[in-house]
Image (cartoon, rainbow, N blue to C red):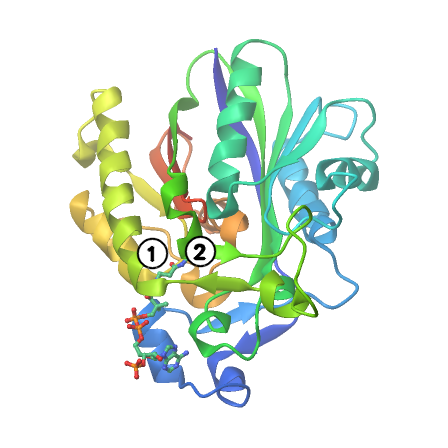
Amino acid sequence: MYSRIAGTGHYVPKKVLTNTDLEQMVDTTDEWIKSRSGIERRHIAEADEYTSDLAVQACTAAMEAAAVGPEDIDFIVVGTTTPDLVFPNVGTIIQAKLGIYGCPAFSLEAACSGFIYALSIADKFIGTGQAKCALVVGAETLSRITDWSDRSTCVLFGDGAGAVVLKPDEDAGIISTHLRADGRYKDLLTAKTGVSVQPEGDALSDGFNVQMAGNEIFKVAVKSLESIVEETLDANGIDKSELDWLIPHQANIRIINATAKRLSMPMEKVILTVQDYGNTSAASVPMALDVAVRDGRVKRGQLLLLEAFGGGLTWGSALLRY
Ligand code: COA
């Protein structure tokens, strides 16, 4: 039994922060940000707008698209790095806000790969018959852990949420998912203060923020993504020419270009939202998927390759017939 994406949704907060706005905040330029990352603007959540709020909007859109109601959902999994609270887990907060009762609801942390990890888990539950209608979510308020005085990181991130509804299908759907991690690279991309690791002195604000070795991350990202997309195609005996769309994690246009090149895919076959949304971590893949479904580029029956890469380091892919 396949699990098939029955509906998609995404949501971004109303507030837009442009590169020109950032020029007023740190020593940077629109030209530098665009040329190094491809990002032109990003959306930022209001102080009283939480990760769960963004997720609920995305889930509602996905459920409408799939023509399912709260009573149909029997599994909720959320990839996020920025849950509302330490606990209850943000899956249960989303569950309550959507009026869904009783089904398992949980979140997982795999940084920017969170949605791919969540999709892989939900796929297994659908495949074994333990779930019949799963909500799979990637949602982030990365602006909360961004150091707005650090020009090397604050220009890269944004807030948003994406969601899909997965249902069983005998004919087509998720063909395979591939998950990887290598903790030896854990210090390349990190927020050094958390729950068990407490801040020293008054270092909470510094330690809580994203710190990144951008150059090194870039190189490992390109290498790992190249190898996982090849592994994914090989595992299924599929030639890269058969792919209709690449839907990559939207961290940086140059990383995306490198993966597309390895797949010999012209950029017209790559879904890009990085210019409008920046890097929204676990939310970026389902957001890009929904954008392309709604504007009519991604059509039923097409072959899609999803991939993501993030802190941990973690990375992963999903090959699916939409
Ligand atoms: N505006 C202007 N200059 C900036 C800047 C900014 N926002 N941020 C950094 N710089 C400066 C640096 O200080 C450095 O100056 P120096 O040469 O005088 O020291 C110079 O620009 C070059 O910095 P560098 O880090 O080498 O740039 P880069 O070409 O590697 O691009 C990133 C930086 C972050 C865009 C790039 O490394 C990247 O995208 N890495 C991957 C990040 C990522 O995807 N992370 C998330 C993974 S999920």
Helix or strand or loop: what does disc 2 sit on? strand
Q: Residue at x 44, y 23 (%)?
A: 173
Report if residue 135 is visible in the image.
yes
Task: From the viewer's perspective, tell me whether residue 212 is left or right of residue 101.
Answer: left
Task: From the viewer's perspective, tell me whether residue 110 is left or right of residue 36.
Answer: right
Disc 1 within 8 angstroms of ligand 1 (CB):
yes
Task: From the viewer's perspective, tell me whether residue 181 is left or right of residue 236.
Answer: right
The mark nearer the N terminus, 2 or 1, is: 2
Dividing the picture into quarters, in which one does residue 72 lie?
top right
Q: Residues within 10 Å of mark 2 (few under 14, many from 20)?
A: some
Observer-nearest of 246 and 109: 109
As measured in the structure, the alpha-carbon distance from the residue carrying label 2 to the one carrying label 1 is 7 Å
Q: Residue at x 59, y 63 (%)?
A: 207
Helix or strand or loop: what does disc 1 sit on? helix
Please provide percent x and percent y for residue 260.
Answer: 23, 49
Please provide percent x and percent y for residue 119.
Answer: 51, 31
Disc 2 within 8 angstroms of ligand 1 (CB):
yes
Please provide percent x and percent y for residue 164.
Answer: 57, 36
Q: Residue at x 67, y 38 (%)?
A: 64
- Above/below status of 104 relative to 308: above
Determine which residue is flagged by label 1: 217
Cβ–Cβ below 8 Å for labels 2 and 1?
yes
Determine which residue is flagged by label 2: 189
Quadrant containing ligand 1 reads bottom left
Dot label at residue 191: none
Please provide percent x and percent y for residue 161.
Answer: 60, 51
Disc 1 residue type? Ile
